[in-house]
Image: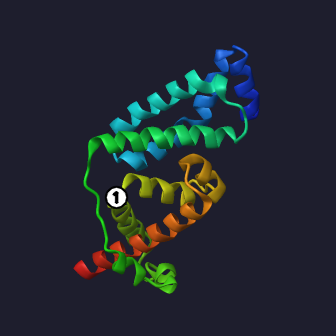
Amino acid sequence: MELYTDNYYVKRIQEGDDACFACILDKYGTQIHTLIVRIVGNSEDAEELSQDVFMKVYKSIVSFKGTSRFSTWIYRIAYNTAISATRRRKQVYLTLEESQLTNVSDDELNDSMSSLEKSERLERLEHALELLSPDERALILMFYMQEKTIDDLVQITGLSNSNVKTKLHRIRKKLVVLLQEMEEKE
């Protein structure tokens, strides 16, 4: 089957061609599952939540107006579904004092892990990411790993442009503090 644009498939689905939904699943299934795993931290839960996301997408695709990109719309559904699930679990996440974050310079942000081997950097970063709250982890991962733009994140999260930028900056600082604490423990 020839690959068409998201808008083509959405229009066909809205016109009653349910078979085209398989193309949406093929294109976004792995991406959505990966995002949800990173937010909830559990593959089994992520599998169930991914199914929930695609059920929501299927049921509400008729209301998709095309005012944003389809990918942004589906990511917003996935983000909201995963964040809601984590809020219900009431897990405890690391909190840092404001003074710890304000003491991190921009140079420290840029140089925080440059002296470590790549595999060691990745291992420490993975551990630090696990210590973030789900919404912080989702925001930083969508920006850096899935290369979502600030505008995409605004539409996905419902936050303002300046709030997204501020949160990303604070999360980076938080990661630096966490990484420094890991280094000190060694």
Nearer-the-camera pick, 16 or 117: 16
- Where residue 67 sits in the image (x, y, percent)? 73, 39
Q: Residues within 10 Å of mark 1 (few under 14, many from 20)?
A: some
| Residue at the image point whose x is 39% and y is 66% from the top | 125
Q: Which quarter of the figure has residue 65? A: top right
For the question of whether residue 8 can be seen, the reply is: yes
x then y, percent, for residue 137: 43, 57
Q: How many marks?
A: 1
Q: Residue at x 49, y 44 (%)?
A: 79
- Place residue 45 in its image quadrant: top left
42 sits to left or right of 168 = left
Q: Residue at x 73, y 16 (%)?
A: 15
In the displayed structure, 98 sits above or below 45; it is below
Quarter residue 28 falls in: top right
Q: Amino acid at mark 1?
A: Glu
- Tell me residue 130's x, y (percent): 34, 58
The image position of residue 86, as x and y in percent, is 34, 44
Q: Relative to 19, does residue 47 appear above or below in the rendering?
A: below
Residue at the spot x=35%, y=80% of the render? 99
Q: Quadrant of the N terminus?
A: top right
Q: Which residue is mark 1?
A: 130
Q: Secondary structure at mark 1?
A: helix
Q: Quadrant of the C terminus?
A: bottom left
Q: Residue furthest left?
A: 185
Residue at the limit of the structure toward the top, as seen here: 16
The color scheme shown is rainbow
Q: Is residue 42 visible?
A: no
Left or right: 4, with 105 as reference point: right
Q: Nearer the viewer, residue 36 or 152?
A: 152
